[in-house]
Image (spheres, helix red, strand yellow):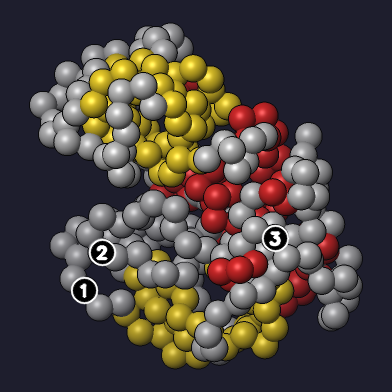
Amino acid sequence: MNSSRSVFRNLSLLFFAACASHGSAPSPGPDAAVALGPSCVGDAPATGLGAYSSTLIAQMQAADLIFRATVTAVHAKTIPDPVDTTSLVVARVTATAYASQGIAELGSTWGNTLTIDLASANLAVGATVFFLAQVETYNGGQLEVKEITRVDETQLPNIAADAPRMMQLFAQNPLYARIASSRAIVRGSVGSIAPEAGICASEHCADWQLAAVSPAETLCGAGASPLTVGYSGSMDIAWYQSPKLATDQQGVLLLHHAPMPIDPETATPNLIVIDPLDVHPLADEATIAGLLASPPPLP
C-alpha cells in the first residue's frame, strides 16, 4: 500500500424540522470566537460532540490514524526510504482511538512503532502526544504518517474515548459529517465566477474556480459578503464528482476549509465546496437547519 488516495477519501471521511426562521438558533460552540457566529457543530451537548470545534472535526474526518504515542527518537525513521529526517520522529504508539480500514488491513506488520512527519519539528525524546495523522508511506513493513494536528488532552480530556464514537457517528450520518466540519453554512446566490490565478502543469489539478457568493442567510459561521468560494472546475477522474457552481445559482452551501493541502500544484482557496454533499437546493435548508438544532447523538 502507498500513500496515494483519492481527493474524496481525504476530504469526505475529508472531510434541518425548522422553518424559515430555523427554530431555535444553535448555541455558540468552540468555533464561535473565530467564526463570529454559531458553530456548525450545532446544538450538540458540550459533554460530547459539542466540546469539539468544526475545525478539529474536519481534521478528525481527514485522519487515517488517531492515536497517542511517545517519541523514542528524533530526526530518525523506521521506513527504508532515503528521505530527509529533519521533521521526522520515531514514536511508539501507546493507544489507538481510530484507524482507517487501510491501516487496519496492514495488521501487525508495523508493530506499534512508526515514523511521524511532524507539522512542527519541536518534540523531544520522551514526549507523549495525541496525534491526528494521514498515511504518508508504507514501505518495507514500516509505516510513516503525516501529522495533521496534535491535541492537548488537558483541554480535551475525553478525546481518546470520544474519537471512535464520533467517527462512527460520521460514517452513519454523512450529511451531518459535512455539516459539523463546515466553517460556515449559507443560503445564497452565486454571482461572478473567475479562475484562480496560477498555472498547473498536471492534468490532475483541481482547476480552482472562484465564485462570489452573496449570502441571504447564514445558518452557522460567518464571513464577509460576498464570500469567495472555491470549487473544482476539473472533470478529471479525481474531481468530476465534486460540485460545480454556476452564475445565478441559488442554494445552500456547506463551506469548508481544507484540513490538509488538497492540490499540490496550486494553492487551495480559503473556503471550498468539494464534496457532493456540500451544495444543496433551497428545499434542503429545513433539513440542514434541523440537524444544526438537533444533532444526532454520539453512539
Dot 3, how many residues are within 10 Å of its Cα: few (below 14), some (14-19), or many (20+)?
many
Which structural element holds mark 3? Answer: loop
Please indicate whether residue 212 sits to the left or right of residue 264 in the image. Answer: right
Q: CA distance from mark 3 to mark 2?
A: 32 Å
Q: Nearer the viewer, mark 1 or mark 3?
A: 3
User: Residue 198 shows which numbered tag?
Assistant: 1
Quadrant (top left, top right, bottom left, bottom right) of the N terminus = top left
Residue drawn at the location 88% of the way across and 66% of the way down? 17
Question: Given contact means CB atoms under 8 Å apart, are the residues at marks 3 and 2 in contact?
Answer: no
Which structural element holds mark 1? Answer: loop
User: Residue 266 shows which numbered tag?
Assistant: 2
180 is higher (above) or lower (below) than 103: below
Between discs 3 and 2, the one toward the N terminus: 3
- Where residue 161 sits, quadrant-wise, is top right
Which structural element holds mark 2? Answer: loop
8 is higher (above) or lower (below) than 216: above
User: Residue 29 shows which numbered tag?
Assistant: 3
